[in-house]
Amino acid sequence: MELVTAALLALLVPDCLAATRPNFVLIFADDLGYGDLGFSGHPSSLTPNLDRLAANGLRFTDFYVTSPVCSPSRASLLTGRYQTRSGIYPGVLYPGSRGGLPLNETTIAEVLKPLGYATAMMGKWHLGYGANGTYLPTRQGFDHYLGIPYSHDMGPCQNLTCFPPDVKCFGYCDQGVVTVPLMSLDTIIQQPVDFVNLDDAYRNFATRFIRTAAEAQQPFFLYYPSHHTHYPQFAGWKSVGRSLRGPFGDSLLEFDSTVGDILKTLDETGVLKNTLVFFTSDNGPELMRMSRGGNSGLLKCGKGTTYEGGMREPAVAYWPGVIKPGVTHSLSSTLDILPTFAKLAGAPLPKVQLDGVEMTDILFNHGPGKRETMFFYPTDPSEKYSVFAVRWGKYKAHYYTRGATHSGTTPDKDCSVFAFLQQHDPPLLFDLESDPSENYNLTLKNFPEWATVQNKIQDLKAAFEASMEFGQSEIGKGTDPTLEPCCNPDCSPKPKCCQCGTVGY
């Protein structure tokens, strides 16, 4: 124990030698629900590697993202700031979006690079492409990049193979735009992407990156925002047909297998015990897809909503020999990852207003941590309505509620797109420890401390709103079809002519 404590103290000293700096692997699933994994109780999900991560790591029960949809959630993860500050709202970015994550925002990669870290990303970016790739990861601190610059349903998919030998993708995905490209650094190497072999490419990419950094004794940061389990699901030969859960289960198994390969490489290269692996997801499940859309477990609604099912996510921190296995109920968020990595690496924080707090007390002491509140913005935040809900301690107050298309098809009428915006005055109030499903509204009649709690939450809300400066909306800049990535930029007619590359890469 004394050796572990000494090691931790060394890691937390800003002037420590580069050789002692920890490595970081950040794994970010897509549209994965609170109830989707084996360790969270799903009876037919096959996730042995994530289950092992949870069993041997610190599992978070009260971990939140900042948005119930993709782009804004990812912006907050990488910057430690609510998406309203960086302008990644309303909704998400598209292939031809003019805007993207502003280059003056500081990402985790940009925090770590000055300290000598090698940085790499593989998977789904979804923070902008822009003119000539202005907003790609290579412009945001990543030395290496292999992936798709936005969501893999943002291009025609009905004629693409999602499962071998030749099972076409389910549905049509977005029409009238270019097919989805695969990029290496800032170059398109395949269009459309070969889904069947995509995760094999990611595994090879991760293996090469980790081995190269380990051999050079260079600290590294690997960011893996997976496409799994977003619609349309896909999987390769190693996973197809192996799950009892159908296409969604096969997709989830492929994600789990890639995680397993990353852990295996960390172990084989001898760097596992000097690496913090952090896993979570970007937002809740897309319930409108029914059996192909994930499961929020006992939480209410899913993607697109500010109910628990939309923004409360599974999360695990794993660092063998350093983080003691267990479960924490401490309130935490993706906002807190940048400050935590910076603290452990001895890096200075960006000189901007951060919304995250470092989590070392939670990670190393299983303590309460520093976060007391979480603010819930809808998919289209505005200064007029501001936050829809606030969590303080175990209590959550809803000032506004609204359903979403993404969460349709469930029996709960509050989740549907036809559950229109509703203001609550006084706010709905739930005790999330005794009622995580948000079923039983606390009132003055059944909760004597109602006024005290409501007043405290209102004060916190007012202080937060006073500190919030909305950045210019990047998504509000609109789209331009000529900005859509095309491997043959001079070809005609577009978008159909944008095709290149061969099967396998």
Image (cartoon, rainbow, N blue to C red):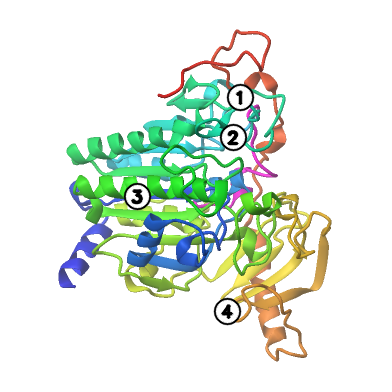
Quarter of the figure with residue 409 = bottom right
Q: Nearer the viewer, mark 2 or mark 3?
A: 3
Q: Type of residue at label 3? A: Gly
Q: Nearer the viewer, residue 84 or 158?
A: 158
Q: Nearer the viewer, residue 3 or 348?
A: 3
User: Start and end of the magenta stretch?
Assistant: 80-97
Q: Nearer the viewer, mark 3 or mark 4?
A: 3
Asked if the residue under mark 2 is in contact with the one under mark 4, i.e. CB atoms within 8 Å, the reply is no
Distance Cα–Cα, label 3 vs label 4: 32 Å
Q: Type of residue at label 2? A: Gly
Q: Which residue is mark 4?
A: 433
Q: Main secondary structure of the magenta part?
A: loop
Query: Which residue corresponds to the image point at 38% horizontal and 66% vertical from the top-left?
Result: 58
Quarter of the figure with residue 284 = bottom right
Position of residue 90 in the picture relative to residue 57 (left or right): right
Q: Which residue is mark 3?
A: 260
Distance Cα–Cα, label 2 vs label 3: 32 Å
The local secondary structure at tag 2 comes to: loop
> Does the magenta-highlighted stretch encompass residue 81?
yes
Q: Nearer the viewer, residue 157 or 478?
A: 157
Give how far across and how far down residue 397 sits, in percent: 69, 72
> Does the magenta-highlighted stretch encompass residue 286?
no
Give how far across and how far down residue 502 sits, in percent: 46, 18
